[in-house]
Amino acid sequence: MPATLVKLHNVRMRYANGDGLDHVNLEMAPGDFVYLVGPTGAGKSTVLKMIYMQEFPNEGYVLVDNYNSMYIKNKEIPHLRRKLGIIFQDFKLLEDRDVFENVAFALRVIGTRRRDIKKKTLRALAEVGLSHKSRKMPHELSGGEQQRVAIARAIVNDPILLLADEPTGNLDPKTAVEIMNILEKLHARGTAILMATHNYELVNSSTRRLVSIKHGRTLN
Amino acid sequence: MINSLFFVLKEAAAGLVRARFAGFVATVTVAISLVLIGIFLIITVNLGRFADNLRSRVELEVFLDDSLDEIRIQELAEKIKRFEGVAEVTFISKEMAVYEYQSLFKEKQQDYFEVLGYNPLPASFRVKLAEGYRNFAGAENLFKHLSAMSEIDEEDIVYRREFLVTLEKYMKVALAADFVVGVILCLSALLLVSNNIRLIILTREKIIETMKLVGATRFFVRMPLYIQGVIEGVLGGALAALFLYALIKLAEFEIAGYIVVDWRIYLMLVNLGLLLGLAGSFSAIRRYL
């Protein structure tokens, strides 16, 4: 594995409405835990989108593992994303299938063997403490539980980097702590984590590295 | 691989169930369009058959000079047979011409010949055109070859030139109308399938987004949509084939002997449905995914 897991070098990008990023720099090594903090609209989600290559810089480049935004081909993007786990504030669970199928979905769509799907899914659900609710539908779960399902789906493929976009944004403080504990546990196991948040309270109580972003600029 | 196929088929089935009403409407519309296309095809094929039948009767009649003896007539017939586009050359002697004349105009013809005291009707060749030459161009080409022969005068060659020209003109109009109607019907079916796939894409937006985020390749994202389009198209085609078959069975008594329906038309409708489904999916996926 390369010494640098993620690198954003002088990244500049503009949306049609004028928002975007302005010479953003960020570097992460394997196993790092980094908070990306800033107010709403500062460009946190855009940084994450750059990393999973849904958006591309107009200037500068993004390096993730061995993939460079300047040279990556469209057909390589799915392979990059298989190395990442992504969770969102609104969980993005599929309402038409149960917890097990939501997690297994991430494996099914990449053509994993059936035997491995069962083993990996059960392991991921155990990791987030939801083994007993594997046959529940998403609407039968609390917000915290839904986010745990989303985390299980994100880690089921053993990602090298977990991208968390405001994962506690929709949760009460107690549940938010539970989610943070799970992320800490995953980090302790060696998974690098980049978490975007505007919850300064949550970040201030942590000793982790912090990268601030304001008006599309990073302030380390 | 089998797991992947199983997953793709399952997702396609789930997509069809989720957008079942729109899917039903698209299938029925494809079926209606294909029934109309089928009817137009049957009409066209039979129109073609009818025109072929008329064309096969077209022949050039070459009247011969009375001075030509039997040997020269024989030689002439051999020469004509070798021309491009000639299927058959029949010699009608002066006596046979009289016989034909008499059977055509049964009354008083004997008087006519008795008055003249000789047979005024010339001997002739009836030249039938070979298949592929039974059209205005073929007949005209042969006409030029025949009139270039020293033994034959241009005005002694007779054929139904105007009839052929008119027939071809009407056939062209019929085929053009057929083509235009066919294209309009195909396009409307295509738009409906495409719109239904767009609806499926909208109802599956979250699934598609999740698929992309967890690293699904284009095959996994798109294949269920293609399969859905194809299923709708094939079902529409099969429905159209069944309906048309029933319609023709019901009308069999009235149309027997006039209209011939080739069974391959049903197969063609199903294939056309498949193509429409595939093209509809392709256009929706390209625009909305």
Image (cartoon, coloured by chain):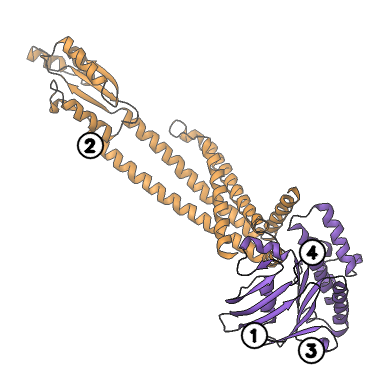
The three-letter amino acid code for the residue at tag 4 is: Asn
User: Between tags 1 and 2, which lies in front?
Assistant: 1
Residue that mark 1 sits on: A216
Residues at circles 4 and 3 in contact by the CB criterion of under 8 Å: no
| Chain letter matching colour orange | B
Label 4 sits on residue: A102
- The spot of residue B110 in percent (x, y) is 15, 14
Label 1, label 3: how far apart the Cα atoms are: 18 Å
* Chain letter for the residue marked with disc 2 in the picture: B
Kind of residue at disc 3 = Tyr
Left or right of B119? Residue A35 is right
Q: Are marks 1 and 3 on the same chain?
A: yes
Disc 1: host chain:
A
Q: Could you say which chain is coloured purple in the image? A: A
Between circles 1 and 3, the one closer to the viewer is: 1
Measured in 3D between alpha carbons, the distance from the residue under mark 4 to the one under mark 1, in whole angstroms, is: 34 Å
Secondary structure under tag 4 reads: helix
Q: Secondary structure at mark 2?
A: helix
Q: State the separation of the CA atoms marked 2 and 4.
A: 75 Å
Q: Which residue is pictured at 78% across the width and 80% down the height? A: A34
